[in-house]
Image (tube, rainbow, N blue to C red):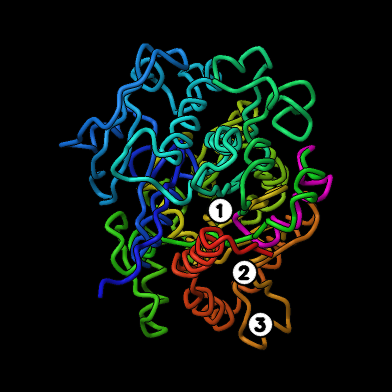
């Protein structure tokens, strides 16, 4: 007899690695659906038709043509398999919405596209109507799983139907980005005025796409257990803490994972010097030393093995705590600490870092922008990876650092608190330490933690033991996939998730 029909799940997001990426959301969309497919779920994707995505979709077929709507003359829905990802994907082919310079959300001038609510409103509407079964009659998901505000309106559209025939899951990757829009945009978003209420998508006189997801989804997840607790408080809730606390019975914190096929120092094609996490201690030490030396050479840093080399791969924002790092650098760089930093963002932070790098060219290697190859080389070659965030839903950089034996130095919030074991004397003695954590969002706390890392680095045996413990931790996507599958199963069988 044939086995049971696999659960059918549609994942909806605004970016996906390696095709289009501005942050960790792309890494999640590039890895989690594949992990779910390996577990036996029938997974498909829905993505905006950016040029890079359409180029990766050869031999696609048109399953629907709709419009005019959302500011576009037509919305052509294509279905194919994305090159390099090997999952079926629906792509909204609408050049007027998605064929633009800049990144998915900003123009080349760094400003948000004014029609972003319409662009991603089309994404949410299409996701809902795939769930309702009236876009592709040959495949209908049981679960529509939306990621971040870009997909939040899918839950609002599904909620307009008393028996939609599918359930919804909404994952908050970063509550700070909310997808706000004016009320007069409701008709263009094909939403009824009745949805613009306090217990709907209204938020301080505007519509909020992320609130739509929080309010209407059958189940809500965040990307770490600690962040799920934090966003129910005023400090981290971004004004939505009451909504989230009210729906806490259907809220789960599921830690993101790492795609170890991409992030593995033993076979990483982007590294000049590779090393095996399971190698003998002498080989591991020598491999890390070669990676550090290669990074110092690439960035023009003084090639001194004994100096603590800090690595940062980050958006340059106050959320990421980069202002704290800028304050701390003058206190440690003159004493020999080095920095390799890759990122872009706030103009003043870029200018301050550029000035520091010009003053200390052999100690600070700065690259403004994003470079995937350099990101891998910093994470492999630095001694520690620094993530001093004021809030951090999950964080992936510290997980990559763990795998590469680059010890995370992080503020103990969100997913950082869930994944890094501080190098306290007891943890070092017990062999459980994997990095360095601090509590306060202050330069003083960050500076003290950098000095603690320097002290441990002076003990090669203790440092190597921490490296090996860090590299042995398992944050593969299998665990997250198992947790999501349990939610899907309970929702589709109409069993409440508590």
First-in-chain label (1 vs 2): 1
Cα–Cα span, label 1 and label 2: 18 Å
Give the residue at mark 1. 338
Quarter the N terminus occupies: bottom left
- The stretch of residues the image draws in magenta is 223-239
Quarter the C terminus occupies: bottom right
Q: Residue at x 69, y 30 (%)?
A: 201
Above or below, 87 against 460 in this view is above
Q: Position of residue 407 (x, y in %)?
A: 56, 66
Tell me if 271 is positioned left or right of 176 in this view.
Answer: left
Label 2 sits on a secondary structure element that is loop
Tell me if 125 is positioned left or right of 1 in this view.
Answer: right
Instruction: Please tell me whether mark 1 or mark 3 is closer to you in this view.
Output: 3
Q: Residue at x 43, y 60 (%)?
A: 381
Label 3 sits on a secondary structure element that is helix
Tell me if 282 is positioned left or right of 352 in this view.
Answer: left
Q: Are marks 3 and 2 in contact (CB under 8 Å)?
A: no
Give the residue at mark 3. 428
Q: Is residue 230 magenta?
A: yes
Give the residue at mark 2. 435
């Amino acid at each position: 007899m044939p086995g049971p029909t696999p659960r059918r799940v549609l994942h909806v997001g605004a970016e996906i690695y390696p095709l289009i990426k501005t942050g960790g959301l792309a890494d999640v969309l590039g890895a989690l659906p594949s992990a779910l497919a390996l577990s036996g779920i029938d997974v498909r994707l829905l993505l905006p038709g950016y040029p890079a995505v359409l180029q990766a979709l050869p031999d696609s077929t048109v399953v629907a043509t709709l419009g005019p709507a959302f500011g576009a003359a037509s919305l052509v829905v294509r279905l194919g398999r994305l090159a390099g990802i090997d999952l079926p994907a629906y792509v909204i082919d609408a050049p007027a919405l998605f064929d633009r310079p800049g990144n998915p959300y900003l123009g080349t001038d760094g400003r948000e596209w004014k029609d972003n609510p319409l662009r991603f409103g089309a994404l949410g509407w299409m996701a809902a109507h795939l769930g309702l079964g009236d876009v592709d009659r040959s495949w209908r998901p049981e679960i529509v799983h939306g990621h971040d505000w870009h997909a939040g309106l899918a839950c609002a559209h599904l909620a307009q139907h008393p028996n939609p025939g599918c359930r919804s899951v909404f994952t908050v990757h970063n509550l700070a980005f909310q997808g706000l829009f004016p009320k007069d945009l409701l008709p263009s978003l094909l939403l009824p005025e009745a949805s613009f209420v306090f217990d709907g998508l209204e938020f301080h006189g505007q519509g909020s796409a992320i609130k739509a997801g929080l309010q209407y989804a059958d189940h809500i997840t965040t990307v770490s257990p600690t962040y799920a607790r934090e966003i129910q408080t005023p400090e981290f809730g971004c004004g939505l803490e009451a909504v989230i606390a009210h729906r806490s019975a259907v809220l789960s914190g599921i830690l993101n994972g790492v795609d170890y096929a991409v992030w593995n120092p033993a076979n990483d094609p982007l590294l000049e010097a590779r090393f095996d996490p399971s190698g003998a201690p002498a080989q591991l030490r020598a491999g890390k030393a070669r990676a550090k030396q290669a990074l110092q050479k690439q960035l023009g840093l003084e090639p001194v093995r004994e100096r603590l080399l800090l690595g940062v791969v980050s958006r340059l924002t106050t959320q990421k705590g980069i202002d704290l790092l800028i304050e701390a650098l003058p206190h440690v760089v003159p004493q020999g600490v080095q920095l390799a930093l890759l990122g872009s963002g706030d103009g003043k932070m870029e200018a301050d870092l550029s000035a520091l790098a010009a003053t200390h060219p052999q100690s600070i290697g700065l690259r403004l922008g994003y470079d995937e190859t350099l990101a891998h080389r910093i994470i492999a070659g630095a001694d520690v990876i620094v993530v001093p965030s004021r809030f951090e839903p999950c964080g992936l950089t510290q997980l990559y650092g763990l795998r590469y034996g680059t010890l995370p130095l992080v503020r103990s919030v969100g997913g950082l608190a869930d994944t890094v074991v501080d190098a306290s004397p007891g943890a070092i003695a017990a062999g459980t330490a994997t990095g360095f954590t601090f509590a306060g969002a202050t330069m003083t706390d960050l500076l003290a933690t950098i000095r603690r890392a320097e002290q441990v680095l002076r003990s090669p045996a203790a440092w190597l033991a921490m490296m090996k413990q860090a590299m042995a931790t398992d944050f593969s996507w299998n665990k997250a996939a198992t947790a999501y599958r349990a939610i899907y199963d309970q929702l589709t069988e109409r069993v409440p998730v508590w």
